Image: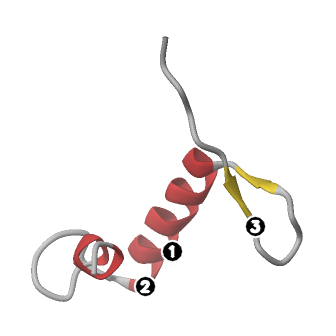
Amino acid sequence: MTETTDMIDPVTGEIIDQKELAESLLEQAREQGVSLVGPGGLLAGLTK
């Protein structure tokens, strides 16, 4: 059995859809020309 941990928005108390959040971040990165990997990339910033 897999257990999932829901992310809760600390401001609204609503459950955050993690897939929707990831897709939104990727779309914004593409629009702004931000690299996804490598130094200064989106993934490096998210994992700090």
Q: Position of residue 33 (x, y in %)?
A: 34, 82
Residue 20 or residue 29, whichever sits in front: 20
| Disc 3 residue crowd, few under 14, some 14–19, many 20+, Cα 10 Å | few
Query: What is the CA distance from the residue labelled 2 to the residue labelled 3?
Result: 25 Å
Residue 47 or residue 25, whichever sits in front: 47
Mark nearest the camera among 1 and 3 is 3
Q: Is residue 33 left or right of residue 24?
A: left
Q: Residue at x 59, y 58 (%)?
A: 21
Residue 32 has which mark? 2
Q: Residue at x 29, y 72 (%)?
A: 47
Q: Amino acid at mark 3?
A: Asp
8 versus 45 height, above or below:
above
| The image quarter in which residue 10 lies | bottom right
Query: What is the CA distance from the residue labelled 1 to the residue labelled 2?
Result: 6 Å
| Disc 1 residue crowd, few under 14, some 14–19, many 20+, Cα 10 Å | few
Q: Residue at x 53, y 26 (%)?
A: 3
Would you name the residue on which mark 3 appears? Answer: 9
Residue 37 or residue 11, whichever sits in front: 11
Residue that sits furthest to the left in the current view: 38
Q: Position of residue 11 (x, y in %)?
A: 83, 78
Query: What is the CA distance from the residue labelled 1 to the residue labelled 3?
Result: 20 Å
The answer to whether the residues at label 1 and label 2 have Cβ atoms under 8 Å apart is: yes
Q: Amino acid at mark 1?
A: Gln
The answer to whether the residues at label 2 and label 3 have Cβ atoms under 8 Å apart is: no
Q: Amino acid at mark 2?
A: Gln
At mark 1, the secondary structure is: helix
Badge 1 or badge 3: first in the primary sequence? 3
